[in-house]
Image (spheres, coloured by chain):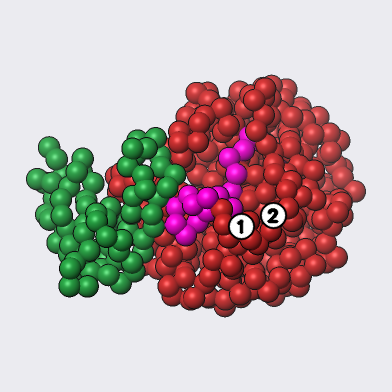
Amino acid sequence: MRPVAVVGIGKTPFGAFADRDLRSLAVEAGRKCLEDAHAKAGQVEAFYLGNFAGPSFVGQNHLAPYVASALGITGVPATRFEAACASSGSAFYHAVTAVAAGIYDVVLIAGVEKMTSQPTAKVAEILAGAGDLCGEVKAGATFPALFAMIARRHMHQYGTTREQLAAVAVKNHSNGAKNPYAHMRKVITMEQALNGKPVSEPLTVYDCSLISDGAAAVLIAPLDRARDFTSKPVRVLGIAQTSDRVALEEKDDITTFAAVKSAAEKAYRMAGLGPNDIQFAEVHDCFTIAEIVATEDLGFVKKGEGGPYALAGRTCLRGERPVNASGGLKSKGHPVGATGVAQIFDVSQQIRSEAGERQLERHSLGLAQNLGGSGATAVVTILGAA
Amino acid sequence: MSAASSEPTPGSGTVYTETVVFSPPEAFASDVPYQLAIITLDTGRRLTARILGPRAVIGDRVRFVEFRNTIPYFRKSSSS
């Protein structure tokens, strides 16, 4: 397998953009990415698009060639990947494996979602399609409800508290306020986070990520061609995607995501690294509890210690291992199909020393963790300076 | 055609985890707030169900009441 590098990155701001359609967002991210890599559309040998629910949110199908052709990319494979909130993480994983295997040299991966044209209850219903419609969803589960049940069980087994959950929200809003691409650039206090409107007990609005529009794109190439495109290549040191059961009720222990653990183990093995080597991470904080569980499943702390780890400030911008320096899904926004590639963008930006006010002191080795549904898909990527 | 006639009655079980939903999907807008739980049935199988009546917490014993539109409803056992 050949080493692979990220040689270009591009992203739209995330937010609620009434005047933007899905394609224009994806095209903006793709153009910025190609410009960043000094690449032309004609050099792209395959296009991988992550999108969760374009057909439900905006009614458009056949999305990959629809977006690719608007970027001037035709005559190559253009395919959409759907893996719930891990859709573009999955697209990135499959693109990397194809380049590593020598099938292509230059591949563009984009992720996009246009969510805000639907009312919140309809969005909840579309998102619930990532769960089991014959069981949990039929009974009335939304994604906030599923993660609320994970939070309750985590609290029961490990003594995790509301304050620990709130600490994740406060930190991520503080980071996102420094991110010009973030959806909600607003600092919140612990008191606010603890007294938010309930969504699904024990989770309040401040525990939930945002409903956003947005897109992100990255260009990859074999490492030995990376300097054709950029002076700052970012190497893919390890990557894995794994799967698990869709329904929460079918998992033995809902306080851990088996797919995240197995993807992390594989990615660490491929990179020849362990959790202690990781300097910073972008993790999938679709809900505050998900960040706490992620820090445990990735091996940053022991099982059950994710809550105290967050509350003690060890994952802050100036903490020992910053988590979600971008603001995370909580503050940056969560256009679900864009999130996986946006995480690769954010980790790459840190490695390239382009993160502005959020720039971390130790930034040569980072990890991205993208989660689909309540854990049925997980993608873990380890990136390093090349 | 209902699941009620084709599925065996779930019987009773113990609350594994639970939540109260305030922000519902479109289909259940008139039900809020409602309690949802994953129940470990006495057979060992887990089931996502609604809880009727008094709030049940993790570890509470619950018993099956009925299916409504194929959704299983449970109630906290009076002994717990």
- Where does label 2 land, which residue? A188
Are the residues flagged by discs 2 and 1 from a single subunit? yes
At x 53%, y 25%, the residue is A58
Residue A44: name its quadrant. Answer: top right
- Where does label 1 land, which residue? A193
Number of numbered discs present?
2
Q: Secondary structure at mark 2?
A: loop
Q: How many other residues sit within 10 Å of disc 1, few (<14), some (14-19) or many (≥20)?
A: many
Magenta extent: A197-218
- Say if residue A147 shows up in the picture: yes
Chain in green (letter)? B
x and y percentages locating residue A366 in the rendered image? 73, 61
At x 52%, y 29%, the residue is A118
Q: Secondary structure at mark 1?
A: helix
Q: Horizontally, is A317 left or right of A227 in the view?
A: left
**Against B30, is A367 above or below?**
below
Q: Horizontally, is A154 left or right of A263 in the view?
A: left
Q: Is residue A209 magenta?
A: yes
Chain in red (letter)? A
Kindly report the distance in space between the C-alpha atoms of the residues bearing marks 2 and 1: 7 Å
Chain at tag 2: A
**Against A347, is A50 above or below?**
above
Please say if the residues under marks 2 and 1 sit with CB atoms less than 8 Å apart.
yes
- Say if residue A91 shows up in the picture: no
Outermost residue toward the right in this view: A231
Q: Amino acid at mark 2?
A: Ile
